[in-house]
Amino acid sequence: MNTSTQRAARRWYKGELHFHCERSTMPEMLAAYRRRRYDFCVSTEHDAVHQQAPYCSPDGLCHPTDGTRADRPLLLVGGSEMSLTIPGAAADGANAANGKPVHVGAFPLRAPVEKHAPTWPIFAELRQLDRPPIIVVNHPLAGAPERHWSADDVCAAIGHGATHMELNPRNHGIEGGLRLWDEVLSRGQRVYGVLTNDAHEVTNIGRYGATLVQAAALTAEDIVAGLRRGACYALESGCRARLSHVRRDGREIAAAVTDAEELHFIGAEGRILHSEYAAARHYRVPAGEHYVRVEAVDDGGRRLFTQPVWLDDE
């Protein structure tokens, strides 16, 4: 990943990749996201796709109607949180019997998929669409243990087209999500880590964090393109740090983060390879390490998580 500015016009946009209108209305949710200075949000109703037309113009921009600044439009992207089933050991690839129920995010999406359908055939159908959506492993450790995604499950999802994984804390704290992410990355699987709020009402907004995406413009096409190429990072709620760049030159990684007190370079299995009390650092990665990701910590202990920088393709 190289998150340095690739074109002068690109900038970072703060986004929410997972929210519902379960206990607050769509206008209430949109107004709250705007007040919290989000640039875009992805509607992910359970097994449904929320109609956007009543709330935004054809370009997806929702202009303020609540007295907030008119020069801060909010981009609304349509998606869905799909209730799917990973077939169990006793089931074949087309049969969901004895399977594990999981939640998967998909966006942009125009129509919902069959509820409780087997996961991998649905992924195949999504990949055949004219505009294949981004597929996200949602809150992999939420709920009862029998519903948790294992590293094997996540690796299978990546093999079938998933490209992102939530690090959301829910029942386990973010450390569990980070451990799972590093386990998957350590197997050589490439998946991007994101933070969302899984907000079901306005009071949930900002409870976990946000995902910042580098894009040329505030359009669904550009935001999705930034996510696809991994030009994004995860930010814990309240974190003041902001990523300037992560660059790679051979096995040397250069990272710079504004308002950071510490930088940690993380390798396989979540091992801290190097720590520095600094906001910018060049670090030469030892031979044998296949990826490095950077965690930055602000003065309040809140963290920023970059995407992994892969070293196998040098």
Image (tube, rainbow, N blue to C red):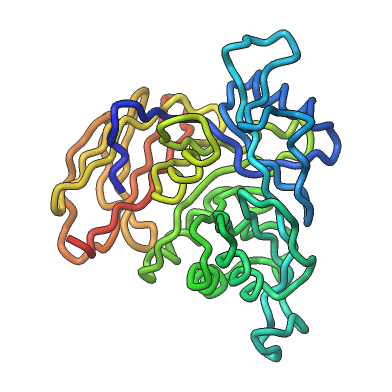
Whole-percent x and y of residue 294? 34, 44
- The percent coordinates of residue 5 (x first, y second) are 29, 33
Q: In the figure, is residue 29 to the left or right of 299?
A: right
| Residue 162, percent from left and from top | 53, 63
Using the rendered view, name the quadrant where residue 50 is placed. top right
Horizontal side of residue 238 vs 200, given as left or right: left
From the viewer's perspective, is residue 1 above or below residue 96? above
Q: Nearer the viewer, residue 116 or 236?
A: 116
- Name the spot of residue 67 as percent of width and height, x first: 72, 8
Closer to us: 183 or 196 = 196
Residue placed at 70% from the left, 65% from the top? 102
Question: Considering only vertical position in the picture, is 60 above or below 310?
Answer: above
Q: Quadrant of the C terminus?
A: bottom left
In this rendering, the count of numbered labels is 0
Query: 29 above or below 111?
Result: above
- Asked if residue 308 lies left or right of residue 31, the reply is left
Residue that appears at 57% across and 55% down:
133
Residue 103 vs residue 286: left or right? Answer: right
Judge whether 32 appears above or below 287 on screen.
Answer: above
Q: Residue at x 18, y 44 (%)?
A: 283
Question: Which of the 4 image quadrants contains residue 215?
Answer: top left
The residue at 59%/59% (across/down) is 137
